[in-house]
Amino acid sequence: MEPSALATAFGAGILAGLGAVLPLGAIGVMLLHEGASRGWRRAVPAAAGVGTADLLFAVLALAAGSVLTPLVAQWGRWPAAVGGVLLLVVAVVMVRNGFRPVAEESDGADAVGDGAGWARYAMFFGLTAVNPFPLVYFGAIAVGMGEGLHRPPVATAFTIGVGIASVGWNLVLVGLGAVLRARSTARMRRIVTVAGGAIVAVAAVVVLVAAFA
Protein backbone atom coordinates (compact mmCIF):
# COMPACT_ATOMS: atom_id res chain seq x y z
CA MET A 1 0.00 0.00 0.00
CA GLU A 2 1.50 3.31 -1.12
CA PRO A 3 1.82 5.96 1.60
CA SER A 4 0.31 8.49 -0.80
CA ALA A 5 -2.91 6.47 -0.98
CA LEU A 6 -3.17 6.41 2.82
CA ALA A 7 -2.40 10.13 3.03
CA THR A 8 -5.07 10.86 0.42
CA ALA A 9 -7.63 8.75 2.29
CA PHE A 10 -6.72 10.44 5.57
CA GLY A 11 -7.09 13.88 4.01
CA ALA A 12 -10.42 12.87 2.49
CA GLY A 13 -11.55 11.72 5.94
CA ILE A 14 -10.56 15.08 7.46
CA LEU A 15 -12.55 16.94 4.80
CA ALA A 16 -15.53 14.59 5.12
CA GLY A 17 -15.54 14.93 8.91
CA LEU A 18 -15.39 18.71 8.72
CA GLY A 19 -18.19 18.69 6.16
CA ALA A 20 -20.37 16.82 8.64
CA VAL A 21 -19.70 19.03 11.68
CA LEU A 22 -18.88 22.54 10.42
CA PRO A 23 -22.52 23.54 9.81
CA LEU A 24 -23.45 24.90 13.26
CA GLY A 25 -26.65 23.04 14.05
CA ALA A 26 -28.36 22.21 17.31
CA ILE A 27 -25.57 19.88 18.48
CA GLY A 28 -22.97 22.57 17.83
CA VAL A 29 -24.95 25.10 19.86
CA MET A 30 -25.27 22.56 22.66
CA LEU A 31 -21.50 21.98 22.65
CA LEU A 32 -20.92 25.72 22.95
CA HIS A 33 -23.31 25.77 25.90
CA GLU A 34 -21.59 22.73 27.40
CA GLY A 35 -18.28 24.56 27.44
CA ALA A 36 -19.87 27.76 28.76
CA SER A 37 -21.75 26.04 31.58
CA ARG A 38 -19.28 23.33 32.62
CA GLY A 39 -15.84 24.54 31.56
CA TRP A 40 -13.53 23.01 28.94
CA ARG A 41 -12.31 19.98 30.88
CA ARG A 42 -15.78 18.85 31.97
CA ALA A 43 -17.19 19.47 28.48
CA VAL A 44 -14.66 17.23 26.71
CA PRO A 45 -16.81 14.05 27.15
CA ALA A 46 -19.64 15.72 25.21
CA ALA A 47 -17.30 16.55 22.33
CA ALA A 48 -15.96 12.99 22.40
CA GLY A 49 -19.50 11.58 22.32
CA VAL A 50 -20.36 13.47 19.14
CA GLY A 51 -17.04 12.51 17.57
CA THR A 52 -17.51 8.83 18.44
CA ALA A 53 -20.94 8.81 16.79
CA ASP A 54 -19.55 10.40 13.62
CA LEU A 55 -16.69 7.88 13.58
CA LEU A 56 -19.15 5.01 14.01
CA PHE A 57 -21.28 6.31 11.15
CA ALA A 58 -18.20 6.48 8.91
CA VAL A 59 -17.27 2.88 9.79
CA LEU A 60 -20.81 1.67 9.13
CA ALA A 61 -20.96 3.55 5.82
CA LEU A 62 -17.71 1.99 4.65
CA ALA A 63 -18.60 -1.48 5.89
CA ALA A 64 -22.13 -1.68 4.53
CA GLY A 65 -23.19 1.73 3.27
CA SER A 66 -24.82 0.32 0.14
CA VAL A 67 -27.05 -1.83 2.36
CA LEU A 68 -27.63 0.41 5.37
CA THR A 69 -28.33 3.67 3.54
CA PRO A 70 -31.46 2.34 1.72
CA LEU A 71 -32.55 0.65 4.97
CA VAL A 72 -32.34 3.92 6.88
CA ALA A 73 -34.29 5.61 4.09
CA GLN A 74 -37.08 3.03 4.61
CA TRP A 75 -37.45 4.12 8.22
CA GLY A 76 -38.95 7.31 6.88
CA ARG A 77 -39.80 10.03 9.36
CA TRP A 78 -39.22 8.16 12.62
CA PRO A 79 -35.47 8.71 13.20
CA ALA A 80 -35.91 12.44 12.56
CA ALA A 81 -39.01 12.52 14.78
CA VAL A 82 -37.20 10.85 17.68
CA GLY A 83 -34.26 13.21 17.27
CA GLY A 84 -36.58 16.21 17.19
CA VAL A 85 -38.33 15.17 20.40
CA LEU A 86 -35.01 14.59 22.17
CA LEU A 87 -33.73 17.99 21.05
CA LEU A 88 -36.94 19.59 22.32
CA VAL A 89 -36.45 17.97 25.74
CA VAL A 90 -32.87 19.21 25.87
CA ALA A 91 -34.02 22.72 24.89
CA VAL A 92 -36.57 22.76 27.73
CA VAL A 93 -33.89 21.70 30.22
CA MET A 94 -31.49 24.38 28.96
CA VAL A 95 -34.11 27.14 29.24
CA ARG A 96 -35.15 25.92 32.70
CA ASN A 97 -31.53 25.98 33.87
CA GLY A 98 -31.14 29.47 32.47
CA PHE A 99 -33.96 30.75 34.67
CA ARG A 100 -32.69 29.11 37.87
CA PRO A 101 -31.26 31.37 40.58
CA VAL A 102 -27.52 31.78 40.30
CA ALA A 103 -26.85 30.17 43.70
CA GLU A 104 -28.86 27.10 42.77
CA GLU A 105 -27.06 26.84 39.42
CA SER A 106 -23.67 26.96 41.17
CA ASP A 107 -24.67 24.34 43.72
CA GLY A 108 -25.91 22.05 41.00
CA ALA A 109 -22.63 22.35 39.14
CA ASP A 110 -20.58 21.58 42.23
CA ALA A 111 -22.67 18.53 43.01
CA VAL A 112 -21.88 16.76 39.76
CA GLY A 113 -20.14 13.47 40.51
CA ASP A 114 -17.36 11.60 38.70
CA GLY A 115 -19.89 9.71 36.62
CA ALA A 116 -21.24 12.91 35.05
CA GLY A 117 -18.62 12.77 32.29
CA TRP A 118 -19.88 9.40 31.08
CA ALA A 119 -23.45 10.63 31.30
CA ARG A 120 -22.64 13.65 29.11
CA TYR A 121 -20.74 11.42 26.70
CA ALA A 122 -23.71 9.05 26.41
CA MET A 123 -26.21 11.87 26.00
CA PHE A 124 -24.32 13.60 23.18
CA PHE A 125 -23.52 10.28 21.53
CA GLY A 126 -27.21 9.37 21.58
CA LEU A 127 -28.38 12.74 20.27
CA THR A 128 -25.95 12.44 17.36
CA ALA A 129 -26.67 8.76 16.72
CA VAL A 130 -30.44 9.20 16.29
CA ASN A 131 -29.83 11.55 13.36
CA PRO A 132 -29.65 9.44 10.17
CA PHE A 133 -28.02 12.22 8.12
CA PRO A 134 -24.36 11.32 8.92
CA LEU A 135 -24.85 7.71 7.79
CA VAL A 136 -26.42 8.83 4.51
CA TYR A 137 -23.72 11.51 4.13
CA PHE A 138 -20.79 9.16 4.70
CA GLY A 139 -22.49 6.46 2.64
CA ALA A 140 -22.70 8.82 -0.33
CA ILE A 141 -19.01 9.68 0.09
CA ALA A 142 -18.10 5.99 0.29
CA VAL A 143 -19.97 5.26 -2.94
CA GLY A 144 -18.48 8.30 -4.65
CA MET A 145 -14.89 7.39 -3.79
CA GLY A 146 -15.22 3.94 -5.29
CA GLU A 147 -13.87 0.51 -4.42
CA GLY A 148 -10.44 1.75 -3.31
CA LEU A 149 -11.93 3.14 -0.12
CA HIS A 150 -13.06 -0.34 0.94
CA ARG A 151 -9.51 -1.68 1.27
CA PRO A 152 -8.88 -2.02 5.03
CA PRO A 153 -5.77 0.23 5.30
CA VAL A 154 -7.37 2.97 3.20
CA ALA A 155 -10.68 2.69 5.04
CA THR A 156 -8.86 2.89 8.37
CA ALA A 157 -7.00 6.04 7.33
CA PHE A 158 -10.27 7.59 6.14
CA THR A 159 -12.17 6.84 9.36
CA ILE A 160 -9.29 8.09 11.52
CA GLY A 161 -9.42 11.34 9.56
CA VAL A 162 -13.17 11.60 10.15
CA GLY A 163 -12.75 11.01 13.88
CA ILE A 164 -9.94 13.55 14.26
CA ALA A 165 -11.85 16.21 12.32
CA SER A 166 -15.07 15.69 14.27
CA VAL A 167 -13.52 15.55 17.73
CA GLY A 168 -11.15 18.41 16.90
CA TRP A 169 -13.92 20.77 15.79
CA ASN A 170 -16.12 19.78 18.71
CA LEU A 171 -13.27 20.57 21.11
CA VAL A 172 -12.96 23.97 19.44
CA LEU A 173 -16.66 24.59 20.12
CA VAL A 174 -16.47 23.63 23.79
CA GLY A 175 -13.28 25.68 24.05
CA LEU A 176 -15.07 28.74 22.70
CA GLY A 177 -17.82 28.12 25.21
CA ALA A 178 -15.25 27.83 28.01
CA VAL A 179 -13.68 31.16 26.99
CA LEU A 180 -17.14 32.71 27.19
CA ARG A 181 -17.56 31.19 30.66
CA ALA A 182 -14.26 32.63 31.88
CA ARG A 183 -14.99 36.13 30.59
CA SER A 184 -18.68 36.47 31.29
CA THR A 185 -20.81 37.30 34.28
CA ALA A 186 -23.37 34.92 35.78
CA ARG A 187 -26.15 36.99 34.23
CA MET A 188 -24.58 36.76 30.78
CA ARG A 189 -24.19 32.99 31.11
CA ARG A 190 -27.87 32.72 31.99
CA ILE A 191 -28.81 34.77 28.93
CA VAL A 192 -26.60 32.61 26.72
CA THR A 193 -28.13 29.46 28.21
CA VAL A 194 -31.68 30.63 27.51
CA ALA A 195 -30.74 31.82 24.01
CA GLY A 196 -29.03 28.51 23.28
CA GLY A 197 -32.07 26.60 24.50
CA ALA A 198 -34.29 28.73 22.25
CA ILE A 199 -32.09 27.99 19.24
CA VAL A 200 -32.15 24.25 19.99
CA ALA A 201 -35.95 24.43 20.39
CA VAL A 202 -36.31 26.09 17.00
CA ALA A 203 -34.09 23.42 15.45
CA ALA A 204 -36.21 20.72 17.12
CA VAL A 205 -39.43 22.22 15.73
CA VAL A 206 -37.92 22.44 12.25
CA VAL A 207 -36.88 18.78 12.45
CA LEU A 208 -40.33 17.69 13.64
CA VAL A 209 -42.15 19.74 11.00
CA ALA A 210 -39.91 18.32 8.28
CA ALA A 211 -40.46 14.79 9.61
CA PHE A 212 -44.23 15.00 9.55
CA ALA A 213 -44.70 17.28 6.54
Image: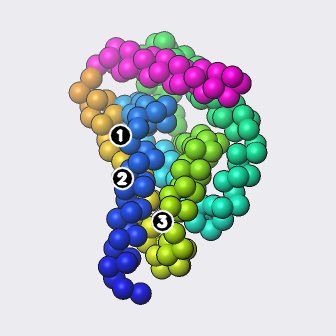
**Residues under labels 1 and 3: Cα distance?**
30 Å
- Circle 3 SS class: helix
Kind of residue at disc 1 = Leu
Indicate yes or no whether the magenta region holds residue 106: no
**Mark 3 = which residue?**
145
Q: Position of residue 172 (x, y in %)?
A: 32, 44
Q: Residues within 10 Å of mark 1 (few under 14, many from 20)?
A: many
| 1 vs 3, front mark | 3
Q: CA distance from mark 2 to mark 3?
A: 24 Å
Whether residue 149 can be seen here: yes
Numbered disc 1: secondary structure? helix
Nearest the camera: 188 or 62?
Answer: 62
Which residue is painted at 41% across and 48% down in the image?
19
Q: Which residue is mark 1?
A: 173
Q: Is residue 175 found left or right of 127 in the rendered image?
A: left
Q: Which mark is residue 168?
A: 2
Residue 24 higher or lower than 41, as above or below: above
Badge 2: how crowded within 10 Å, few (<14), some, or many (20+)? some
Q: Residue 31: image x %, image y %? A: 43, 37
Q: Earlier in the sequence, mark 1 or mark 3?
A: 3
- In the picture, measured across the screen, residue 121 lies left or right of residue 178, that is right
* Magenta residues, start to end: 185-213
Nearest the camera: 113 or 41?
41
Give the residue at x 41% y 34%.
Answer: 24
135, above or below 77, in the image: below
Does any portion of residue 38 appear in the rendered image? no
Residue type at the position of mark 3 = Met
| Type of the residue with mark 2 | Gly
